[in-house]
Image (cartoon, rainbow, N blue to C red):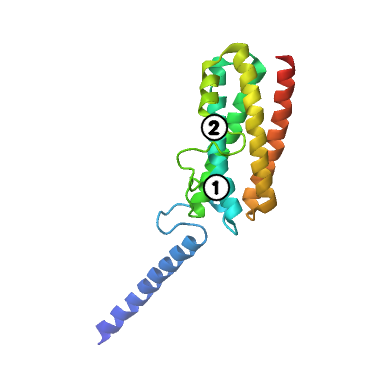
């Protein structure tokens, strides 16, 4: 009997320690860790947590391919453009829009929505400002001063389309992060439109 009493006395602190460890682990999990992966959620995902509506979803689904085309255009400039300012602007566009694509993709994953807009999986040329395949091919074939002018003209139209899409998000969206990005797109791309119009005046 005495030996059993000693055994129970030794086991009680050990059980309490195990319980404390389990509770500590669960507390850490709910404070931001993912029980499944053991890794914290990305800033991209957490920035979109909260209320959202179909306008937010449509904005991200449409702006991703819109940005992707702008990045594709910008990546042509280093080898084809003659004007240093055109090359610099193209790099500015690429550097801004590549991270925005990743951000919006993260939102859609967080919202558990497809990254492709339903009905537009094979093409997005109905969106405002998007180039046709023929226009893209012509830009790819151009070089020097011809490329500089064509790039500026097409990118102005492309940016104007993006501004229209972003303004629709500002008017109809609900998610604070999506609306904040839409405002940034309007401000940045309107400034770039002004720059490209000035470029065209001297090219």
**Circle number at residue 130:** none
Q: Is residue 29 left or right of residue 179?
A: left
Q: Which residue is mark 2?
A: 69
Q: Image point 53% across, 34% down: which residue?
A: 68
Give the quarter of the figure containing the N terminus.
Answer: bottom left
Give the quarter of the figure containing the C terminus.
Answer: top right
Please state which of the two labelled residues, at mark 1 or mark 2, is closer to the viewer: 2
Q: Which residue is mark 1?
A: 44
Element type at mark 1: helix
Q: Earlier in the sequence, mark 1 or mark 2?
A: 1
Mark 1 crowdedness (10 Å alpha carbons): few <14, some 14-19, many ≥20: some
> Can residue 62 be seen by looking at this rendering?
yes
x and y, in percent, of residue 140 in the image: 52, 20
* Rendered image quadrant of residue 184: top right
Out of 154 and 191, give the one closest to the viewer.
Answer: 154
- Measure the C-alpha gap from mark 1 to mark 2: 22 Å
> Can residue 41 be seen by looking at this rendering?
no
């Amino acid at each position: 009997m005495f030996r059993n009493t000693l055994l129970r006395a030794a086991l009680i602190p050990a059980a309490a320690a195990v319980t404390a460890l389990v509770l500590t682990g669960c507390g850490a999990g709910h404070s931001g860790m993912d029980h499944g992966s053991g890794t914290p959620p990305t800033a991209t995902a957490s920035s979109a947590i909260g209320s959202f509506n179909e306008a937010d979803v449509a904005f991200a689904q449409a702006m991703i391919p819109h940005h992707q085309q702008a990045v594709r255009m910008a990546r042509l400039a280093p080898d084809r453009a003659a004007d240093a300012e055109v090359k610099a602007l193209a790099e500015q566009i690429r550097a801004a829009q590549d991270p925005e694509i990743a951000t919006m993709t993260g939102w859609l994953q967080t919202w558990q929505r497809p990254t492709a807009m339903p009905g537009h999986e094979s093409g997005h040329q109905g969106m405002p400002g998007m180039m046709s395949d023929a226009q893209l091919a012509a830009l790819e074939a151009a070089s020097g001063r011809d490329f500089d002018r064509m790039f500026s003209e097409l990118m102005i139209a492309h940016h104007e389309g993006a501004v229209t899409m972003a303004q629709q998000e500002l008017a109809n969206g609900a998610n604070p992060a999506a609306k904040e990005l839409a405002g940034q797109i309007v401000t940045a791309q309107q400034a770039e439109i002004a720059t490209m119009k000035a470029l065209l005046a001297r090219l």
